Image (cartoon, rainbow, N blue to C red):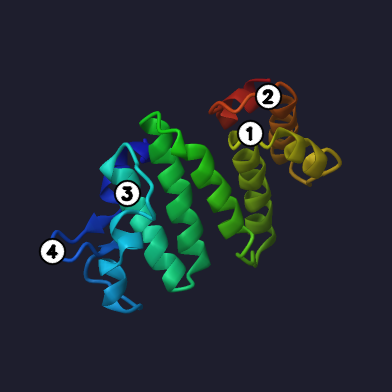
């Protein structure tokens, strides 16, 4: 259900093009950023949806602010909107999300484990199957469900499956 609300997660100012979860939030980078070709054209990417463009613009703002968590989530959400619109840019955006994720520093053990699971999914969904197998084949997490998810990601990678799957599929196994 949460995915169906994505169009409400970010607002875009119709006057200046600023994108934020709340337009009242202060822009922490020079406003000139909003006038650059990179920003206005989403760095030349031709997304199939305005929502993908909005998430990508939010990524550009977050990147300029050096807010790695927001940068990562903006790219992740952009990839999801690409999926929803059969946009081939989804793979490229996932690869960008991985690079952004690697800049983040998880503080809590739960957060570290969540990022491991997300990393495995991003790698597989961006068709880096051998990397999933190599990186996670010997990984053992304390939580059984998390281990089952990693095992599932490896199995899918061995089958060269980059499709969307759910945790429900793992639990049913």
Regarding mark 4 in the picture, which secondary structure is present there? loop
Q: Which of the numbered marks, if any, corresponds to residue 92?
A: none
Screen quadrant of the C terminus: top right
Regarding mark 3 in the picture, which secondary structure is present there? helix
Residue 59 position by quadrant: bottom left
Which is nearer the eye, 88 or 111? 88
Residue drawn where x is 13% and y is 64% of the image: 15
Q: Which residue is mark 1?
A: 127
Task: Tell me the crowding category of disc 3: few under 14, some 14 to 19, or many 20 or more residues within 10 angstroms, Cα based.
Answer: many
Counting residues from the start of the chain, the first of labels 3 and 4 encountered is 4
Task: Tell me the crowding category of disc 4: few under 14, some 14 to 19, or many 20 or more residues within 10 angstroms, Cα based.
Answer: few
Residue drawn where x is 36% and y is 52% of the image: 55
Q: Residue furthest left?
A: 15
Q: Which residue is mark 3?
A: 53
**Side of 142 relative to 75 (left or right):** right
Between the C-alphas of marks 3 and 4, the distance is 16 Å
- Image vertical order of residue 21 relative to residue 8, above or below: below
- Image vertical order of residue 162 relative to residue 89, above or below: above
Q: Which residue is mark 4?
A: 15
* Residue 107 in the image, given as x and y percentages of width and height: 65, 67
Between the C-alphas of marks 2 and 1, the distance is 7 Å
Task: Tell me the crowding category of disc 1: few under 14, some 14 to 19, or many 20 or more residues within 10 angstroms, Cα based.
Answer: some
Q: Which residue is mark 2?
A: 160
Instruction: Please say if the residues under marks 2 and 1 sit with CB atoms less than 8 Å apart.
Output: yes
Query: Across the whole image, how many numbered discs are drawn on residues?
Result: 4
Between the C-alphas of marks 1 and 4, the distance is 39 Å
């Amino acid at each position: 259900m949460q995915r169906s609300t994505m169009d409400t997660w970010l607002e875009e100012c119709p006057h200046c093009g600023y994108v934020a979860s709340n337009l009242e939030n202060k822009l922490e980078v020079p406003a000139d950023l909003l006038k650059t070709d990179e920003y206005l054209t989403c760095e030349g990417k031709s997304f199939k949806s305005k929502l993908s463009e909005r998430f990508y613009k939010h990524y550009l703002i977050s990147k300029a602010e050096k807010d790695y968590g927001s940068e990562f989530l903006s790219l992740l959400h952009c990839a999801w909107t690409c999926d929803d619109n059969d946009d081939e840019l989804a793979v490229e955006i996932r690869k960008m999300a991985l690079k952004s994720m690697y800049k983040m520093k998880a503080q809590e053990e739960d957060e570290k484990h969540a990022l491991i699971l997300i990393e495995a999914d991003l790698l597989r969904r961006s068709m880096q199957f051998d990397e999933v197998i190599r990186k996670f084949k010997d990984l053992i997490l304390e939580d059984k469900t998390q281990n089952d998810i990693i095992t599932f990601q490896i199995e899918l990678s061995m089958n060269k499956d980059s499709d969307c799957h759910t945790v429900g599929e793992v639990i049913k196994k």
